[in-house]
Amino acid sequence: MPHDHDHPHAHLPSDPALRVKALETILTDKGLVDPAALDEIIDTYQNKIGPKNGAAVVAKMWADPAFREEMLNDPMPRLQEMGLYGRQGEHMVFVENTPETHNLVVCTLCSCYPWPLLGIPPGWYKSDAYRARSVREPRKVLAEFGVTLADGQKVRVWDSTAEVRYLVVPMRPAGTEGLSEQDLAGLVTRDSMIGAGLALEPKT
Amino acid sequence: MSRIHDMGGRFGTGAVDPEDNATFAKDWHQRALALNLACGALGQWNIDMSRHARECLSAADYAGFSYYEKWLGGLTDSLVAKGVLTVAELEAGQGATVSELADRKLKADAVAATLAAGSPYTREAAPAEFALGDRVRVRRPARNALVEGGHTRLPAYAAGALGEIVLMHGAHVFPDSNAHGLGEAAEPLYAVRFTARELWGGEADPEDEMVLDLWQSYLEAA
């Protein structure tokens, strides 16, 4: 048998899609789950909360020095005002990439991630390979993402072992002086805010 | 000392696949996430208990389950452990009775407010024993000092390592206690920086560094 029968979950169907459905049915029967609430949660993380939130913050940090200072020193009051607060984003810390330091965020123990700013993490962030190797050989992991570091740039890896959530502020690309905040935000990818990518170059 | 979830530094996982890029690769993934959040609203456990439930999956299940299967396994085991569901109901595929917790059900119109409310983990506690720039050594072995085999957020790869305090986070709920119903027991939390060579040996890049958030009782003065 594939399952450890000491554990109750082994009594559900082995096909995971059926397992979810069975559990939802039982919980709905018992009056504990409202399927419409599940739809609402899914809609929230599929359509409303995602990396565009974080990209808007990073673009504003690039464009507005006072806002940048605020985000680096005490971000939570302002994030709350902006409606960028919530579950898994209660204690944000922004870490800036510089010519000297490239930051990379991982959660080796599970999959901690700043939901209000980035949404739900992609598959690779939750993979054994990323969790195991980002701390031991971050440069090789970055190479697998096609990220090349500048000469002399060190890597600082943040392992999210508590309820503090880290967001990387990528370096602002050259040649973006005239761009609006909105156009700047278009250059800020999800991966660049984890540190597994760089901001995009502007189209010329 | 640790359980299978404690993956930092492990060999044998292969390359990272940046193409494994989707938030929800299958429809049931999003349903599994939503079920977890909806059941969390019933108030029968805290975040540390739910992490521990996933970590208590057997090593074979943890290794063999995809990500959301782990969530589902931990959730199901927690629901039964707390008496919310019975094994008989799991086997029957239907609920036998309406639960006495039904009045706590998360309703659709409350979802947005619930997710936006968050739950801060900072608490009032005794002042910090360490200051920015202090040298500290991580306790060894890395294990829950309160409960044998219990939940801890101290990764094995940091055990015994020498680091430096780089951020003071204030006092946070202590997972090693909170996961086992022993109270929040908030302690000062610090970001501690280690050189890659301290953690991984002389082959590591001499400039690279790793920062971990560590509770005060994981640390001693160095």
Image (spheres, coloured by chain):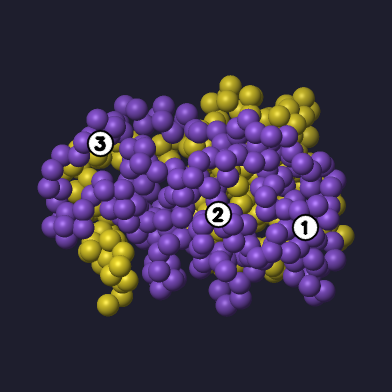
Q: Position of residue A150 (x, y in %)?
A: 82, 58
The amino acid marked with disc number 2 is Leu
Q: Quadrant of the N terminus of chain B?
A: bottom right
| A105 vs A3, nearest the viewer | A3
- Compared to residue B106, the image places residue A119 above or below, namely below
Q: Amino acid at mark 1?
A: Arg
Mark sitting earlier along the chain (3/1) = 3
| Chain at tag 3 | B
Disc 2 on helix, strand or loop?
Answer: loop
Nearer the observer, disc 3 or disc 2?
A: 2
Query: Which residue is under mark 2?
Result: B146
Shown colour of chain B: purple
| Mark drawn on residue B101 | 3
| Badge 1 or badge 2: first in the primary sequence | 1
- Rendering coords of residue B21 (x, y %): 50, 57
Task: Give the residue drawn at x 51%, y 68%.
Answer: B4
Q: Nearer the viewer, residue A73 or B52?
A: B52
Say whether marks 3 and 2 touch (CB < 8 Å): no
Query: What chain is tagged by disc 2?
Result: B
Provide the letter of the chain coloured yellow.
A
In the rendered image, the vertical position of residue A42 relative to residue B141, given as above or below = above
* Kind of residue at badge 3: Leu
Judge by depth and name the residue closer to the eye, B77 or A72: B77
Residue at the image position 53 percent from the left and 26 percent from the top: A83
Asked if residue B89 lies left or right of residue B144, the reply is left
